[in-house]
Image (cartoon, helix red, strand yellow):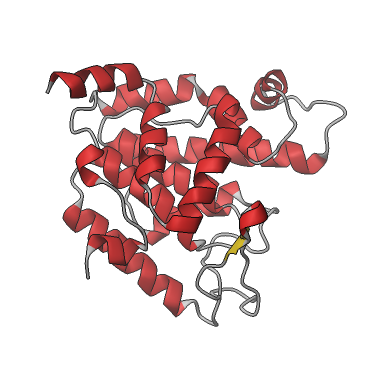
Amino acid sequence: MSLFDALGFHWDRCAVPAAIPVYTVERTCFHFQRMLAEFVWDAGVLEGNPVTFVEVKTLLDGVTVGGRKIADQEQILNLAESSRYLLRLVRSGNFVLNKTTFTGLHQLVARNEALEWGHFRGEGAEWHYTPDVGLGEHGRHTPLPAVKGGANLDEMFRRGVDALNEVVPNAFEKGAAFFLFGTLQQFFFDGNKRASRSMMNGVLMSAGMDAISIPAGKAQEFNEKMVRFYRYHDASEMMQFLLDCHPEAQRIRELKSAQ
C-alpha cells in the first residue's frame, strides 16, 4: 500500500523543504515552554474559546478568572496540561509516534469535553455514533464509522503510522502529515485537531525542530484551508500553511531559495 493510500490523502512532496533549522531537543523544548501561553491561547481560539491571552496567562499561573464558563476554563487548563505532558515525553526521550502516545495526549486534552476520551472511537462504551465535520455550504465530512472494538480505526492508524515511518524521513513532513491524518480520519469523538497537533509538535521537537502554533489571527484562513482539505484530500495547501506558521518560516524560505 502506498503512503497516500495508507493516509487517505496526498500532497506535492517535492514542495516540502528539506532544509529546516535544527537545534538540540532541550533548546526546542525550552522554546516551547517559553511560548506555552501563546500556544495554549492560539489553540483555544481555534476551538472558539473566548478566554483572552491575559486570562490564559492568569490560569496558567494557577489563578481562576471571573466571568468565564467553567467549560472554557477547563479547556484551557486541559490544553496546558497536555502541553506539559508532551514536554515531559520529549525531554525524557519517551515521545513515540504511536497509539499509546496519541491516546495519552487525547486523554488530557479532551477530558470532560469529548463524548469519550483516551481511546479510539468504538473502543469504549459508545460505538453506535459516528461524528462528522461540518463544512458549511459544502456539506459534511464523514470518516470511517465507529464499530464495536474499534478494529477498523486501529488498523487504519497502524497502516498510516507504518507508512510515515517507512517512507517519510523529513520530520516536518512526517509531523505535518500526521496532523492532517489524525484530523481527517477522526480517530476520536472530539479533540482530533488538538491531539493530532500535539503529536505533530512531538515529532518536530524530538527531531530538534521548533514546534508550530497556528496563530489566532490565522484562524479563519486555517478553517478555510481545512475545508478544502476535507473536500479534496489534497494536503499541499495545508502543508504550505503549516510551514508558513513555523517560527522560522522566513529563514526556511531563504534556505530553500538558496538550494
Q: From this viewpoint, which residue is outermost toward the front?
A: 137
Of 82 and 7, nearer the camera is: 7
Q: From this viewpoint, which residue is outermost toward the left?
A: 259
Q: Quadrant of residue 121?
A: bottom right
Residue 220 falls left or right of residue 21: right
Q: Position of residue 174 (x, y in %)?
A: 28, 46
Of 209 and 244, nearer the camera is: 244
Q: Position of residue 232 (x, y in %)?
A: 44, 56
Placement of 6 over or under 106, stated as above or below? below
Residue 23 falls left or right of residue 232: left
Q: Residue at x 49, y 21 (%)?
A: 35
Placement of 257 over or under 209, stated as above or below? above
Q: Residue at x 32, y 42 (%)?
A: 203
Q: Quadrant of residue 79?
A: top right
Which quadrant of the figure contains the N terminus?
bottom left
Placement of 191 over or under 243, stated as above or below? below
Q: Residue at x 61, y 37 (%)?
A: 46
Q: Quadrant of residue 153?
A: bottom left
Q: What is the tally of numbered marks visible in this picture?
A: 0
